[in-house]
Image (cartoon, helix red, strand yellow):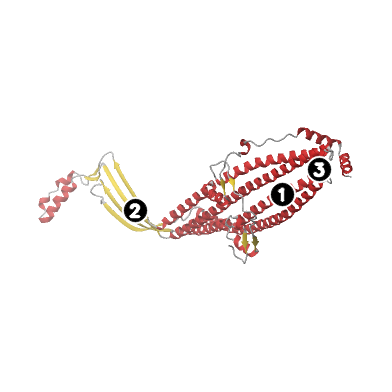
């Protein structure tokens, strides 16, 4: 009866199908084992845990380094803005060499004809001194002159501008801190994806290897059945074709494993070309429980939301400073001067204190338009912040939906795998009892292989989706802890 069914199935095959099966039987050759250059099996590549990989990335990833330098620059700008509260002290000095000394004559030769002896008493003495002094040229400037000036300026009305500028710089520094945390989270998410992808490919390679071994055993059994006249040649060819395809899948998996481990090393910034991830503890399934109100509260503290919130604060401070530029600027001044080589008519030491006022009464609307620009930028930042908060909540909701679907898919895949393996066991027993064809056996093998692969992929898909959800909520990237947000508060 079984042989009759088998004969009927063969007769239903088209001529083209028969030709393809026959050609496959002649072209299928044993696949040699992968060489060291292909897989690197003889090289002991460093192995890392997920925690170690995240720590390595935090230290070595160039994106984190760029963000840290941006924060350093913002900190320096804040300290620079703070210094404007204090007076500015300047020193100016000069040393000049002129073409000649400069003299001035205050009287002509007729002054020498004045007879001071006729003037009685002290007045005569004073006359002689004055005439002698005026008859000689007076030095106004020596050929070499030097000067030294110390000047201090303390802003008064512009202290408000300084205060607003410092407020803006402090907010921008806090924004850089938030962006650094966001960059670190983004880098960690990339590392987690690369880590789980390497594990997934490795386990898929194990599934493909087990499938190859199973089909190899079926091929040997089928050859024995063919020799005994129990099955036909076509059924053995079907097993050979399936074995060739499975071997090809195994080769792809091995190649993919090399690329996945190289990608992991690249993501963490390792010096080694490949890193081997540790296997996760068996049966580990991170929890997932999120309350909608708690999620909305958590999203508000996300890194990008916090960064844009600080930037909006900086824009408001910049607007206030721009408006203050419309009023006159008053500053206190204090100066001390010292001169050398400027003759007898100039005091060699001088100082003064006072107030200075500066006000651009008419600048063709430049200051006014700058204030308008600052207003527009502040309003733009506020509107962008509202849009980002709404988009962040939508992104978090989408990530939660994906994680819930992935969890359900994994739960289903476990049941499907059990059912497919039980079906394979039954069909294999029937095949050994000559009650099922090779086609039935191959279908059961393919179903079991697909179910095993789906369970592996769905498990790591769930872990990746948990990490994406943590990133969308602004939580630290730690997929094995899961996401638990309940009671309106984040952990």
Q: Report the residue marked by disc 3.
A: 438
- Give whichever of discs 1 and 2 has the lower sequence position: 2
The quarter of the image holding the C terminus is bottom right
From the top left corner, tell me how far across and down residue 160 is, in percent: 45, 60
244 in relation to 149, above or below: above
Q: CA distance from mark 1 to mark 2?
A: 82 Å
Q: Is residue 441 visible?
A: yes
Percent position (x, y) of residue 57?
54, 48
Q: Nearer the viewer, residue 127 or 24?
A: 24
Q: Nearer the viewer, residue 366 or 310?
A: 310
For label 1, the crowd category at 10 Å Cα-Cα, with few meaning under 14, some 14 to 19 and many 20 or more, is many
Disc on res. 151? 2
Local packing at callout 3 (Cα closer than 10 Å; few below 14, some 14-19, many 20+) is many
Q: Position of residue 410 (x, y in %)?
A: 70, 54
Task: Tell me if residue 159 comes above or below residue 44 in the rendering.
Answer: below
Q: Residue at x 53, y 53 (%)?
A: 180
Which structural element holds mark 2?
Answer: strand
What whole-number distance in Å separates the C-alpha atoms at marks 3 and 1?
A: 21 Å
- Which quadrant would the N terminus be assigned to in this image? top right
Between label 3 and label 2, give the one nearer the viewer. Answer: 3
Which residue is disc 1 drawn over? 452
- Element at label 3: helix
Picture residue at 67% right of the left edge, 45% below the top: 206
To which quarter of the image does residue 266 belong? Answer: top right
Marks 3 and 2 close (CB-CB < 8 Å):
no
């Amino acid at each position: 009866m079984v042989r009759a069914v088998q004969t009927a199935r063969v007769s239903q095959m088209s001529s083209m199908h028969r030709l393809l099966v026959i050609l496959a039987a002649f072209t299928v050759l044993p696949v040699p084992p992968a060489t060291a250059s292909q897989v690197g099996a003889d090289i002991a590549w460093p192995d890392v845990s997920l925690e170690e990989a995240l720590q390595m990335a935090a230290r070595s990833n160039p994106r984190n380094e760029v963000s840290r330098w941006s924060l350093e620059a913002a900190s320096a700008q804040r300290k620079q803005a703070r210094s404007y509260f204090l007076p500015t002290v300047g020193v100016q000095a000069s040393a000049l060499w002129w073409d000649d000394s400069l003299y001035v004559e205050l009287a002509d030769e007729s002054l020498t004809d004045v007879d001071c002896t006729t003037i009685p008493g002290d007045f005569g003495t004073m006359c002689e001194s004055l005439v002698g002094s005026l008859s000689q040229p007076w030095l106004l400037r020596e050929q070499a002159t030097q000067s030294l000036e110390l000047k201090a300026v303390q802003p008064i009305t512009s202290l408000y501008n300084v205060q607003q500028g410092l407020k803006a710089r402090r907010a921008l520094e806090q924004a850089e801190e938030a962006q650094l945390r966001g960059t670190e989270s983004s880098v960690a998410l990339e590392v987690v994806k690369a880590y789980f992808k390497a594990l997934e490919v490795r386990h898929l390679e194990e599934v493909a290897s087990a499938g190859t071994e199973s089909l190899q055993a079926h091929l040997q059994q089928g050859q024995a059945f063919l020799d005994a006249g129990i099955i036909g040649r076509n059924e053995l060819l079907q097993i050979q074709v399936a074995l060739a395809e499975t071997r090809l899948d195994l080769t792809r998996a091995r190649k993919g494993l090399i690329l996945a481990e190289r990608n992991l090393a690249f993501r963490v910034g390792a010096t080694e070309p490949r890193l081997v991830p540790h296997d996760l503890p068996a049966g580990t399934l991170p929890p997932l429980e999120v309350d909608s109100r708690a999620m909305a509260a958590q999203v508000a503290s996300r890194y990008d939301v916090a960064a844009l919130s600080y930037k909006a604060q900086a824009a408001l401070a910049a607007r206030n400073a721009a408006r203050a530029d419309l009023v006159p600027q008053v500053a206190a001044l204090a100066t001390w001067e010292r001169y050398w080589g400027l003759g007898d008519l100039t005091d060699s030491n001088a100082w003064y204190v006072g107030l200075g006022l500066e006000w651009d009464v008419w600048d063709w609307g430049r200051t006014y338009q700058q204030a308008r620009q600052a207003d527009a930028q502040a309003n733009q930042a506020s509107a962008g912040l509202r849009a980002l908060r709404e988009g962040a909540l939508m992104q978090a909701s989408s990530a939660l939906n994906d994680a819930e679907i992935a969890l359900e898919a994994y739960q289903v895949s476990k049941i499907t795998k059990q059912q497919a393996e039980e079906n394979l066991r039954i069909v294999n027993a029937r095949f050994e009892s000559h009650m099922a064809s090779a086609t039935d056996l191959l279908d059961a093998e393919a179903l079991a292989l697909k179910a095993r692969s789906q369970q592996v992929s769905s498990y790591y898909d769930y872990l990746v989706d948990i990490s994406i959800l943590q990133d969308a909520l602004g939580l630290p990237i730690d997929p094995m802890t899961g996401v638990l947000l309940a009671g309106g508060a984040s952990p």
